[in-house]
Image (cartoon, rainbow, N blue to C red):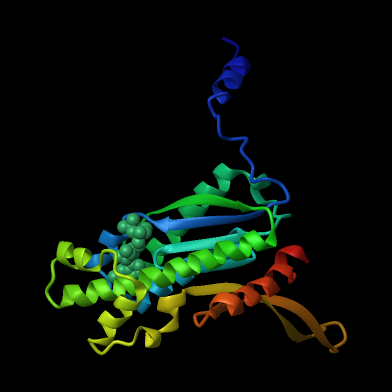
């Protein structure tokens, strides 16, 4: 068979290669640690370990920089990276962003933590700024709910309950009861570190770099961009306002 013809026919098997993130839509890549309940159990402090969170922050930073996103958010073992509607890296190929994103997250986290760890990836599309705000409000609320559950679960485990007992005891308990369970043991959930309850985020901030023109020694000023990392995020409306500002701001990719 003609090699050209063979290649054309074989490439028909690359059935997903033409999938693109819809042009003009906001996009989010979300990566999530695979089997991290087990992976973290013997390695990190429970329910939360600042070192583990810093590895996640470092991984999120690498994704934001390498994939030219505008905003990244991490809570627990997941990271969401936001792309503008005009983002055009990899021609918006879904296969590329998902595989490279998950690969980059796995490599960066593994390098930081010194133990092999694997992330999966998925793409979310949003047709409006409202949809993007709702997406990030959703991930933060999910993180907050899981943080309360994690605190209760590990408090019971440390008191001697088995995994099954702790799970059964918490099953269906409303938020107020979970807060009360902790409060009775001297833990005020509203006082645990904010990064545990709300996650951490990073985005580009402009700054002015002062220098000297080597030709004539005159002072120069140039706008540059650096990453701002926030581990004391607001929530609900205040978080929404922070996000709204970032969606409309320019960034290194748009200048
Ligand atoms: N020990 C510890 N575990 C964490 C920390 N952050 C996240 N995790 C674990 O990561 C898991 C993430 O949840 P999920 O993705 O649903 O579980 P997976 O399917 O096993 O990866 C949580 O259940 C926690 O067990 C941390 O700071 N310390
Ligand atoms: Mg996971």
Residue at 51 percent of width and 64 percent of height: 138
Residue at 32 percent of width and 60 percent of height: 36
Using the image, determine if residue 55 lies above or below residue 93. Answer: below
Furthest toward the right, the residue is: 216
Using the image, determine if residue 193 lies above or below residue 149. Answer: below
Answer left or right for 16 relative to 161. right
> In this orientation, does residue 45 appear?
no
Using the image, determine if residue 206 lies above or below residue 75. Answer: below
Q: Quadrant of residue 214?
A: bottom right
Rendered-image quarter of ligand 2 = bottom left
Q: Which of 115 and 139 is in front in this view?
A: 139
Q: In which quarter of the image is the N terminus?
A: top right
Q: Where is residue 145 in the image (x, y as percent from the top left)?
A: 39, 70
> In this orientation, does residue 175 appear?
yes
Q: Where is residue 143 in the image (x, y as percent from the top left)?
A: 43, 69
Residue at 70 percent of width and 55 percent of height: 87
Q: Which of 216 and 186 is in front in this view?
A: 186
Q: Which of 145 and 92 is in front in this view?
A: 145
Using the image, determine if residue 224 lies above or below residue 42. Answer: below
Q: Nearer the viewer, residue 111 or 172?
A: 172
Q: Position of residue 174 (x, y in %)?
A: 33, 71
Residue at 63 percent of width and 18 percent of height: 4
Q: In which quarter of the image is the C terminus?
A: bottom right
Answer left or right for 248 relative to 220. left
């Amino acid at each position: 068979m003609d090699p050209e013809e063979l290649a054309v026919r074989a490439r028909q098997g690359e059935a997903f290669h033409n999938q693109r993130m819809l042009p003009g839509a906001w996009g989010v890549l979300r990566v999530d640690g695979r089997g991290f309940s087990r992976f973290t159990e013997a390695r990190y402090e429970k329910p939360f370990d600042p070192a583990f969170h810093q590895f996640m922050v470092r991984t999120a930073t690498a994704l934001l920089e390498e994939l030219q996103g505008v905003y990244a958010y991490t809570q627990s073992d997941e990271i969401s990276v936001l792309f503008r509607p005009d983002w055009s890296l990899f021609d918006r190929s879904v296969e590329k962003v998902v595989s490279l994103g998950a690969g980059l997250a796995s490599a960066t986290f593994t390098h930081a933590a010194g133990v092999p760890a694997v992330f999966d990836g998925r793409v979310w599309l949003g047709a409006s700024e409202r949809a993007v705000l709702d997406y990030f409000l959703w991930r933060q609320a999910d993180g907050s709910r899981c943080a309360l559950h994690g605190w209760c679960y590990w408090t019971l485990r440390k008191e001697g309950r088995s995994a099954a007992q702790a799970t059964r005891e918490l099953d269906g308990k409303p938020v107020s009861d979970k807060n009360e369970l902790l409060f009775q043991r001297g833990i005020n959930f509203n006082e645990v570190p904010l990064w545990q309850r709300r996650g951490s985020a990073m985005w580009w901030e402009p700054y002015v770099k002062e220098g000297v023109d080597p030709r004539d020694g005159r002072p120069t000023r140039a706008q540059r961009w650096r990453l701002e990392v926030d581990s004391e995020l607001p929530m609900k409306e205040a978080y929404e306002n922070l996000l709204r500002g970032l969606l409309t701001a320019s960034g290194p990719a748009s200048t």
